[in-house]
Structure formats: structure tokens, C-alpha cells
Amino acid sequence: MPLKLIDHNSTEYHQMVDLRYHLLRKPLGLDFTKEELEREKNDILIGCFEEDKLEACCILTQTAPKTVRLRQMAVSPVLQGKGIGRVLMSFAENIARDRGYHRLTMHARKTAVGFYEKLGYKIHGEEFQEVTIPHFEMHKAL
């Protein structure tokens, strides 16, 4: 499954928004605002494709000169548990390193903490609520 960078507002980007909506927002009764999506135009948008269909994605957002934050990690339910998330994370980390970032942070859903810990991420701070569910801040040096 090829991984690649996605251009903001492209056909692939709209697939990305759709996948993220169905997996991450709709189950919580939430949607995206135009402003949220507009702010992503300067982010690093990453997708994993099976032919022309987006199956997994994530976003990297710069938060400091040498720090990037992982956001909106989503893997199609039929592919969860098959290593796609691990491959996507490795690709995202490599892109971040190639662009000069030294640290990757995230707000990980509590249910995903174990996945990220296996990839070398560490919890920093206490549990907190975000988009109505428990999260932890996690970091990793790149």
C-alpha cells in the first residue's frame, strides 16, 4: 500500500476528510468546521492508499521550530490490526525527521496509548478530556 503526501483541498484530501469524519468525529457526534479544515493547508498531510482509495491517514502540524504534532490518525476498520498504523507512523516520523523536526508529540486517545507506547512514545502529564473523550499527551524524540 503506497504512502504519500497529500495536497490540501485535492481529491485525495477530500477522501482524507471523509475518512477522518467517519472514524473520528461522527461517532462522537462531531463535525469539522471550515476554519479547522482551512488551518490544515500548512500541515503535512499523509495518506495510505489501496489503488486510488484512501485507507489510512494522519496529519503533522508544526507546534514549535523543531516539534511537530501528530493529529487525526485514522485507519480503515477493515485494516486495523494489520500493521498499517505502524507503517503510517514510521513514514510520518521519517517525513518529520527529513524536514528537520526533532520531536513528535500527540494527544492520544486513551484507547490508543498502548499502540503508541509500542512505537516508543511516552506519556507526559495526566489524563485529560478532548473532543469528549479521555486523552494523554505523548512525546517521542526523533
Image (spheres, rainbow, N blue to C red):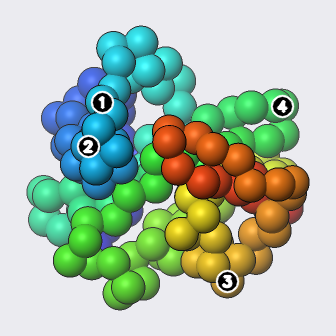
Mark 3 vs mark 2, foreground winner is 2
The answer to whether the residues at label 1 and label 2 have Cβ atoms under 8 Å apart is yes
The furthest residue to the top: 35
Q: CA distance from mark 1 to mark 4?
A: 30 Å
Q: Which residue is mark 2?
A: 26
What amino acid type is highlighted by mark number 4?
A: Pro
Q: Which residue is mark 3?
A: 118
The answer to whether the residues at label 4 and label 3 have Cβ atoms under 8 Å apart is no
Q: CA distance from mark 4 to mark 3?
A: 26 Å
Lower position in the chain sequence, tag 4 or tag 3 = 4
What amino acid type is highlighted by mark number 1?
A: Asp
The local crowd at label 1, few if under 14, some if 14 to 19, many if 20 or more residues have their Cα within 10 Å, is some
What amino acid type is highlighted by mark number 3?
A: Lys
Mark 1 vs mark 4, foreground winner is 1
Mark 1 vs mark 3, foreground winner is 1
* Callout 4 secondary element: loop
* Callout 1 secondary element: loop
Q: CA distance from mark 3 to mark 2?
A: 28 Å
User: From this viewpoint, is residue 73 visible?
Assistant: yes
Lower position in the chain sequence, tag 1 or tag 4 = 1
Q: Give the number of the disc on residue 114.
A: none
Q: Which residue is mark 4?
A: 65
Q: Nearer the viewer, residue 132 or 89?
A: 132
